[in-house]
Image: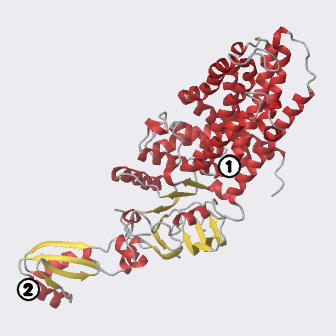
Amino acid sequence: MIWIGRAGARRRMLWETRAAGVVWRREILRCLRNPAQVALVLSQPLIYLVVLGTGLGSLIPDAPPVGDYRTYLFPGVLVMTVYLPAVATGVSIAIDRETGFLREMLVAPVHRASLLAGRCAGGTTVAACQGALVLALAGVARLPYDPALLATLAAELTLIAFTLTTLVTLLAVSVGRRQTLHAVLGFTITPMIFLSGALFPVSGLPSWLAGLALANPLTYVIDPLRQTIAPYLNGRASMTAGQPAAVRELAVTAVVGLLALLLAARRMARAG
Amino acid sequence: MAPDTTHHRRTGLHRRNAPWGASPAVYTRALAKSYRGVPAVAGIDLSVEAGELFAFVGPNGAGKSTTMAMLCTLLRPTAGQARVAGVDVLADPVEVRRRIGLVLQDSACDGDLTVAEHLRFHAALHGMGRHETRRRMDEALDLLGLYDERDIRARALSGGGRRRLAIARGLLTSPQVLFLDEPTRGLDPAARAQVWEHLLQLRQHRALTMFLTTHYLEEADHCDHVGIIDGGRLLAHDSPAALRAALGTDRVHLRTADDRTAAMLLAQRMGVSATRGPDGLHLRLPGAAAAIPRLCAELRVPVLSVEVRRPGMDEVFLHYTGQRMGGSPA
């Protein structure tokens, strides 16, 4: 029967939402029960910020366009902080497929998009929380603890976390085997960070490398963060809003994230 | 060992106490699955009555799991039809999923979740309300002997414990048909016996059809009916007793004080010819267990020992597939 009725449809929606909710909850529980793993994942961006930032910072003159190197590095560090949990979400999907837990979920009479949405929401939450922890270190990067700045960065980070999570999820659903997923992610992470403007401005690169940087999705998520930070530097909190490029980049990020989620749901539906 | 005293004919509707009427719990007609033209399941006709305990036995790659996956709507058949709990798997897979429980190989658990969390997770995915969840969860935990372990993480459970958790999960939605893909695979004998104890206990508590695959032939003896599958075809389908009976009669090994006289008496009075060996007399005797008292009475020579051997399921298996279970190069 096509016609379910409004009450039926509402119950159906409630059911789907609850299903997504428990999948979300499982992601959170997994994170809470493996504090060592979380600490390990958090340590990586901190090493970049503290060790690389301080070490390379001593070589780089404190002048525009870079400024204090740790400040320059901070947007990249934030993105890395949310990227690693996103990868963990993708890997956990591959593990679930191997252990059969995925199949056990797929056999439930709920829409696969709900399962995937719950999963990505869980991954996003975990990533955003870790991002918030690193955001608390803004002072190390010589950033003011301005509530508006921190709130904007946190919101942007959540969006970025969502899109990165859905992209890795799409990859995990498409690739299937865990080893292949690890290989693809491991192979791409370094060049993607190098060519995203996280460590150095891409404007100084030769044209072929700059082209690669333009094709790099990380470039478009680091730039808006940098633009958000810029007005707060050197103590001048002027130039409010009016950054059309940043808004456009964030809008594209959101669209890409949603598309990846829909594609992943479609792929998973077909795999079953 | 389950006493399989009655032999139900495959066509007979012998279980009238089943709540969903006389239609079989699992019914397939020419069900087939092939991968790129290579058949994995080559046309299976099967009917499992409601309330039955049915086992699929066969070597690796025989098509057991593929057939089960099609029945569970995890795989789409390439040909033929299948109905599970009265619903066509192709026409309405979602409804089929509502009516079945599934215990997959390797008992798919998440080590970070506790036993209770696993069940709550499963209940929410199947749209069960909170009260219903709590009630059925307690019942399932009880049935599988996991009540005291409900707050333990799955990681800390033994292999058998994890398998019982998977079975409890499969039961949670009160399915009409419970599918179990090798529920005792990789367990030690004690854990296997425990899992079987719970499975047999389940039959007494619920009007439940259980459809399982197994590698262990002795487990087939617990079942009402056994399907022997190899090369994607169903080679035999009957009760364990009937399958054994088809192989011939029971064998008796007899040791007496005077084998010569005993053999002569056996031929004269019971019309049974026995072969004499250095270790005693060997004879074939239909319905041996029941015939032994009469045999001892007729012999009139002191009987030292009597041993009755029924054809085992491994002999049945060997007969139909031409190979021994497990030892084949597959």
> Which residue position holds label 1?
A173
Q: How crowded is mark 2: few (under 14 residues within 10 Å), some or many (20 or more)?
A: some
> From the viewer's perspective, is residue B306 above or below residue A21?
below
Q: In this view, does A157 lie to the left or right of B146?
A: right
| Marker disc for residue B261 | 2
Single out the residue that lies furthest toward the top.
Answer: A235
Q: Label 1: chain? A: A
Q: Label 2: chain? A: B
**C-alpha gap between disc 2 and disc 1:** 77 Å
Q: Which residue is at a point 82% across and 20% down the rendered structure image?
A: A65
Color encoding of the figure: secondary structure
Q: Which of A213 and B220 is in front in this view?
A: A213
Marks 2,1: beta carbons within 8 A? no
Q: In this view, does B4 lie to the left or right of B275?
A: right
In terms of secondary structure, where does tag 1 sit? Answer: helix
Q: Residues within 10 Å of mark 1 (few under 14, many from 20)?
A: many
In terms of secondary structure, where does tag 2 sit? Answer: helix
Residue B47 locus on image (x, y percent): 56, 71
Residue B181 visible: yes
Residue B129 visible: no
Residue A190 locus on image (x, y percent): 67, 36
Q: Quadrant of residue B316?
A: bottom left
| Marker disc for residue B263 | none
Q: Disc 1 residue type?
A: Val
Closer to us: mark 2 or mark 1?
Answer: 1
Q: Nearer the viewer, residue B91 or A148?
A: A148
* In the rendered image, residues at marks 2 and 1 fall on the same chain: no
Q: Which residue is at a point 42% across and 73% down the rendered structure image?
A: B7
